[in-house]
Amino acid sequence: MTAEEREAPVLEHVPDLPMAAGERIQRAVQSVISGKTDEIRTVLTVLLAEGHVLLEDVPGVGKTQLARAFAAAIGGTVRRIQCTPDLLPSDITGMSVLDRASGELRFQPGPVFANIVIADEINRASPKTQAALLECMAEGQVTVDGVTHRLPTPFLVVATQNPIDMEGTYALPEAQRDRFMVRLELGYPDEGAELAMVQARETAQPLDAVRPVTTEEQFSAEIAAAHAVRAHELVERYAVRLARATREHPDVRLGASPRATLQLVRAAKARAHLLGRDWLSPDDVKALAQHVLPHHLVMHDPRARHDDARAVVAHAIASTVAPVMR
């Protein structure tokens, strides 16, 4: 045992509990998206944690198919918003329209009223339109003409950015990025997965074959169970110390926010639930930190890339003593 392990707090081990719904959803999505097991698992984790995903990747790697496959597997609705500079906030949230029959204003819901909302190329929308998503993502509701309308549950925003073609785009402000629980890259599939995709889609569309593997009520129960995962104070303190370590790094101007810490714990609880546990492990926190924390950081160097932020989080993980499970 190392000196660091001797100094680490020790938590009593608790037996695991069975869980199957998450595996059914994952298998259904994998029938559409080949070779991306870890990425699919991460999106499922975010969905259970009631968070949102920012996918930054080149076109054609399956970002939209991924979101549609999740919606089909949980029996939910999906809407796609193609973000452009002339897109208005009301094009997302909806608006009040005059009902000619009654002479009264009637609310016409926008595409944000769905279980999974795909905001393609979100950085092409103006800052005002981007801001229209803030209330939706943070509070699960839309307010139009002073009237608040609840969004359906579960509710997940999957926003995409193309890191190559950045001309004519509006960079997401820190407040907008802070609403996303996870920033993820799908990347190109390996040769075997790409070949399997080509062969599977020569005569059919795998997405058409996906059927719901759970009901809305069952999935809502899974979300509630993920929220109910027990977290020992020592593990919560570990998550807090990871976030605080990013704020103390010399290359960082703004470290992970308290909202990022909350998102990390929520995501870690969802991971524990997917693994069949009703208790939170330091390994859950550590596994999600590299997905949850980096995009919350603002580096001193404006030319810094996401990999630089990931290196800061890796340093925080390496330098922060985790409780030891026994």
Image (spheres, rainbow, N blue to C red):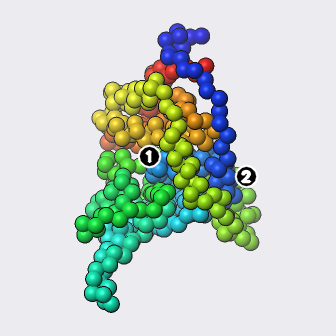
| Residue 287 visible from this viewpoint | no
Q: Is residue 260 above or below residue 323?
A: below
Q: Please give the residue where the numbered disc 2 appears in the rendered image.
A: 192
Residue drawn at x 38%, y 49% is 179
**Label 2 amino acid?**
Gly
| Residue 106 visible from this viewpoint | yes
CA–CA distance in space, label 1 to label 2 = 31 Å
Q: Please give the residue where the numbered disc 1 appears in the rendered image.
A: 181
SS at circle 1? loop
Q: Determine whether label 1 and label 2 are within 8 Å by CB.
A: no
Q: Determine whether, in the image, residue 290 is placed left or right of residue 83.
A: right
Residue drawn at x 29%, y 35% is 253
Q: Position of residue 311 (x, y in %)?
A: 45, 32
Residue drawn at x 51%, y 21% is 323
Residue at far left of view: 146
Residue drawn at x 33%, y 26% is 248
Q: Is residue 5 above or below residue 213?
A: above
> Which labelled disc corresponds to residue 36?
none
**Label 1 amino acid?**
Met
In this rendering, the label closer to the viewer, 1 or 2: 1
Q: Name the foreground residue: 197 vs 215.
A: 215
